[in-house]
Structures are given as structure tokens and as C-alpha cells.
Amino acid sequence: MTALVLGGAASGKSEYAESLILASPHKPRIYVAAMICRDSEDAARIARHQALRAEKGFLTVERPLDLGSWECPLGAAVLVECMTNLLANELYEPNGAGIQAPEKILTALQAISARAGTLVVVSGDIFADGKNYDVETRQYQRMLSQINRGFAALADTVKEIVCGIPLDWKPWNGKEGNYAG
């Protein structure tokens, strides 16, 4: 199963995405984290998140750039968190993909999907606030939209989390049992 889980800040999207992996019959459980550690506060946050995930049986792979260079173990249950960070890293970091980021990220997700038993991708809803942003921010929004649309087309299911409630935009009825909730 492949799933795209979308939501706004503090919507419950990460919790929901983890629940999909925890319900999956596939192993190992791998959490691909895209946050770049920039200071001691980030380091403490990363360590706390790694410990929480380890308690749930997740192996953490820190992959803030170049997701395509990571080879997914065959049959694994993989959670990629979060597309908003991964795109920002690829777009703005000196060693990132720059304007080729959407294509590079989608290619990586397709490769992971081909190997994983379950793939869940978390992405943010940054499109609904109605603000008029500068050119650079609008470019970022367009690129995130391109990734979200591309992966949604590939995904078996697309869920939007609103106030902790999953809304089905693309329901999944797979043969392995619908562990998408």
C-alpha cells in the first residue's frame, strides 16, 4: 500500500501516518526523517523523536537530502516525514537539487514504492491561508503541489487530516486488508 497523508500544522497527520505503519504487516518499520539539524534545540528534538519512534519499533533513517540515494529494504514499511522539509532542503540547501527537486523527489518515491511493502508519505497543507506570498514562496508552493499531485496519482490512498479526523480523498480497498483506517 502507498498512502499520501496531508494536513495543516498540528492537524494529527504525523500521528495518523504512524498508525498506518504500525497497522501494516510489513517489516522492518522505517521512519525516514527529513529535518536538518541546525542547532542544539534541533538536536534535542531529533533525539526525542528518535526515542519515541524506537519505542514503537521504528528504525530511523535521517535523510534531509538526496532521498534517491537511500535503498529501501525489500518489503519494508516506510514512513517519509515530511515532504515540506524535504522539498525545502532540496530547494534551498547548497547540495540540494534546486529547481529539479520535484522530479528528483518523485523519482525517489517511485523507487521506494517499488521496494517497500508499505509506503506512507506525510506532506503539509500550506495552500489554504489565502495570503499573497513573494515569488520565492509561491515557487515553493507550486513545487510542493507538483510533488503532492504526482505522489497522489501513484498512491493507493490519499487522506487529509483535519482536527485529527482522516478524510478520504482516494479511498483504498487493497487485497491485503484495508489497514489504512
Image (cartoon, rainbow, N blue to C red):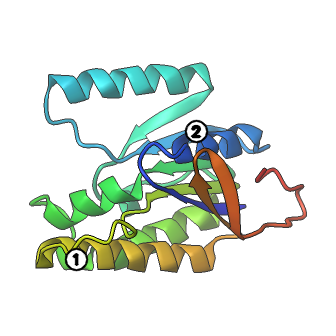
Residue appearing at x 32%, y 72% in the figure? 130
Q: Is residue 64 left or right of residue 150?
A: left
- Left or right: where does residue 34 sit relative to residue 151? left
Q: Position of residue 108 (x, y in %)?
A: 44, 67
40 or 112: nearer the eye?
40
- Give the camera-side residue of 168 and 79: 168
Query: Could you tell me the amino acid type at mark 1?
Result: Arg
Marks 2 and 1, Cα distance to the nearest angstrom?
Answer: 28 Å
Residue 64's place in the image compared with 169, above or below, is above
Instruction: Tell me which residue sits at (30%, 43%) in the image.
Output: 35
Looking at the rendering, in which quadrant would you find the N terminus? bottom right
Viewed as shown, does residue 92 lie left or right of 121? left
Point 39% across, 20% down: residue: 48
Q: Quadrant of residue 18?
A: top right
- For badge 2, the amino acid type reads Glu
Q: Which residue is mark 1?
A: 138
Q: Mark 1 or mark 2, which is nearer the start of the sequence?
A: 2
Instruction: Kindly identify the residue that appears in the image at 33 percent across and 28 percent down.
Output: 46
Q: Residues within 10 Å of mark 1 (few under 14, many from 20)?
A: few
**Residue 27 pos. (x, y %):** 70, 40
Pinpoint residue 62: horizontal percent, then vertical percent: 36, 40
Q: Secondary structure at mark 1?
A: helix
Would you call the spot at circle 2 few (<14 residues within 10 Å), some (14-19), or many (20 or more)? few
Residue 101, picture quadrant: bottom left
Q: Which residue is mark 2?
A: 15
Q: Work out whether 31 lies above or below 133.
A: above
The picture places residue 37, in percent across and down from the top left corner, at 21, 36
Residue 137 falls left or right of residue 80: left
SS at badge 2: helix
